[in-house]
Structures are given as C-alpha cells and as structure tokens.
Amino acid sequence: MKKLPTLLSLGSILLLSVISVFSFWYSLASPAPAPAFYDLTGNNPGTSSDNSGCTACAFGQNEKVTLIAVGDIMLSRNVEQKMISKNDWLYPFRETHQITTTGDIVFGNLESPLIEGPIVQTGQMSFRANPKAVEGLKFGGFNILSLANNHMKNQGSQGIERTIEVLNEKGLKHVGAGLNAEQARQPAILEINGIKFGFLAYLDSAFTPASYEATTSRSGSPFMNEQTLIDDLKKLKPRVDVMIVSMHAGAEYMLTPNEKQKNFAHTAIDHGASLVIGHHPHVVEPIERYNDGYILYSLGNFVFDQMWSEETRQGAIATVTFQDKTVSEIKLTPIKIYDYAQPRILTDAEGEAIIKRMTDFTF
C-alpha cells in the first residue's frame, strides 16, 4: 500500500494546487498521534505538537477506503432529451467518469425517479427519467444513491417502486425512500476492505409536499427530524464501523447553509456520524469541520439542466479518504455543466474560485 505523502510547505502546496489542475487536497486531523492538517473551517495549516511531520505515521498499514460524492443528479427534462437526441445514455457522465470511477464508494443524490413515461418538457417540474439512464450511473461508477429528495415521489408510489426495482437490478444500493417508513429509514450498508459503511438519508419538509413523507402506510422519504436521526444512528452504530448521513436540505441558490442544515448536521456528528453530505441548494456551499466529523453542506449540481446562471452550472466532486476508519483527507475537484447535461472538470481560475468559496469560510 502506498504511504500518504510527507508534509509539504505551504508554498509547495500552493504550487501543487496549480499543477494538479485545481484539485485540492486537505490533510485532516485524526486520532493521536495526529498528523499535520489543513483546517477546513479556516484553511490554515497547523501541526500537532507530538507529530514528527509524517502524515502516514498515524495510520500504520491500515487499508484506505475512498468515497467519492457528488451533488444533484437529475436525469429528466433537458438532460433526458439530450441523451435521447445523442442516442447515448452515458452522455452525462462521459467527461467525469475518469474521476468518479476511482472511488471504492461512489455516492450521489438521484433527483428523478426512473420509470417509463412521456418525455418531460423544458420548464416542467415533475420529473421522470427513462430507466435506461441507469446505464450512465453504472458507467460513472456509482454504487449508492440517495433517493431522499423532493422529486423522488413526482410519479407517485409507482415511481419510487420502479426506481428501486431498476437500481436493484443493476446492483446499485440506495437509501432514503421506500413504500413505507420502515423501508425508507432502512440504512444502506457497504463493506469495503473489511470496513462497514452505513448510510442514512433524510429530506427537509420545508420545500416538500407533506404527502412525500413516508409513513406506516404511505410511500416516500423520511423527513428531517433530529430525534428520528438520533434513533436511526443509535440502531445503526452497532452494525457498522463508519456512519454517513445524507440530507436534502437548505434554501435553493443560497451560498451559505441555514440554521436547520447546521443543526441537523451537527446532531448527526454529535451522535456518531463521521461525514454529512448535503444537496438541494443547486449551488455549492461551504465545508465545515465540526468536532470529530466533516460536513459538505452542498456540492451543487452535478448533472442538471439549470444553465441559466454560472452558480447553478458549477459544482464539486468530493473525494474523501478514510484511513483507520476515520476521515484522513478530503479532495475537491471543481466541475461545470455544459450542454444542459454534461459536467466537465474545470482547469482554470473559475475552478479555483469554486473551491475558495467552499473552503474560505468561517462558521
């Protein structure tokens, strides 16, 4: 197994940021003896007093696991029209799969049910995507998807049921929706290199019809409720080594998280989650390092047709490295959507500005 790189000077890190096409690494603190880190809340370098300068020494020969996360994936409306016109169900993922397929775990928010039906026209807000679009998700390396969002029930219970069927047929795990509350609150568990990762997903009720909440007799998603979250984490904890929470939350087009996002994410970390992954604002929001965990409040759009502003075309791919069952590194790769459907990696100052907006923020 390759060791993590030795600590570089701040000047060297800045130089590497340019050389590595604006993919940005941040070495994070881990249990003592802690390696040096770059504090995500202030982006200021610091070192532990008992660290000898070796970023690998705290981890010994333990296996690494890489999780790649993206934001909103919407395969309906103009995105589906593009795939059909090009006769290419892989089209949205062709320019980013070289990154996303490198993850052991590849996660995103699937914001359109997969079910047969008429093409959704430009401007319509009730989404539906052809089940054939699952081939693009497979091509992109995705192996777990959140279904907890305000569009998953656009086609009713049958849309949720068909989506789950399509994902199961392709071996893609999913979390955050079901035909009743028990199913919707079931965690998704992936075992990588002997480490078990458990995922939970929730949906903010602030912008969602009440009928989209899963109950004992109704399909849908679990709504964000801190006591529900605590109960679910308590049940999950004995079953896994690492807990990750997904939240579809926040205000659309806002560049900073609101109090509900922060409180819910903090509660998740306080009760054992290592990472919280957010989506829904359709723009990137900051990263927060909170106690022993990390919060990606919003990674922005990944595949979407919102070409009407620069901010809604922009997003980020997060590469989170776990070592010794803890987060040891986060890498952010900026992307921008082209042709109403296809994210591409940014290699210029625009990409640098996206990352700065996500990391140069004080909570």
Image (cartoon, grey):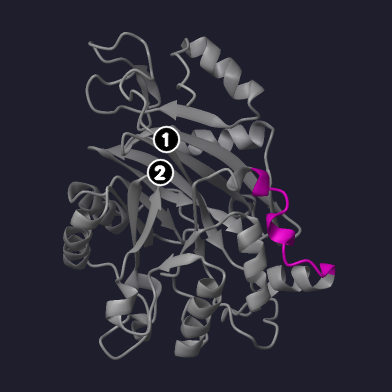
Out of 265 and 146, give the one closest to the viewer: 146
Q: What is the spatial separation of the Cα atoms under label 1 and label 2, in whole angstroms?
A: 8 Å
Q: Residue at position x 50%, y 73% from top?
A: 168
Tell me the element at label 2: loop
Does 237 appear in magenta? no
Q: Residue at position x 34%, y 52% from top?
A: 197
- Rendering coords of residue 296 (x, y %): 40, 46
Position of 314 with respect to 325 (left or right) is: right
Given the image, on which type of amino acid does mark 1 rest?
Answer: Lys
Instruction: Give the quarter of the image for residue 359.
Output: top left
Tell me the element at label 1: strand
Q: Are marks 1 and 2 in contact (CB under 8 Å)?
A: yes
Residue 95 marker? none
Q: Residue at position x 55%, y 45% from top?
A: 316
Q: Residue at position x 70%, y 80% from top?
A: 121
Judged from this view, the residue extending furthest toward the right is 86
> Magenta segment, which residues?
86-98
Does 92 appear in magenta? yes
- Rendering coords of residue 44 (x, y %): 38, 21
Q: Which residue is mark 2?
A: 193
The local crowd at label 1, few if under 14, some if 14 to 19, many if 20 or more residues have their Cα within 10 Å, is many
The local crowd at label 2, few if under 14, some if 14 to 19, many if 20 or more residues have their Cα within 10 Å, is few
Given the image, on which type of amino acid does mark 2 rest?
Answer: Asn
- Rendering coords of residue 352 (x, y %): 59, 32
Foreground mark, 1 or 2? 2
Residue 64 marker? 1
Position of 355 with respect to 224 (left or right) is: right
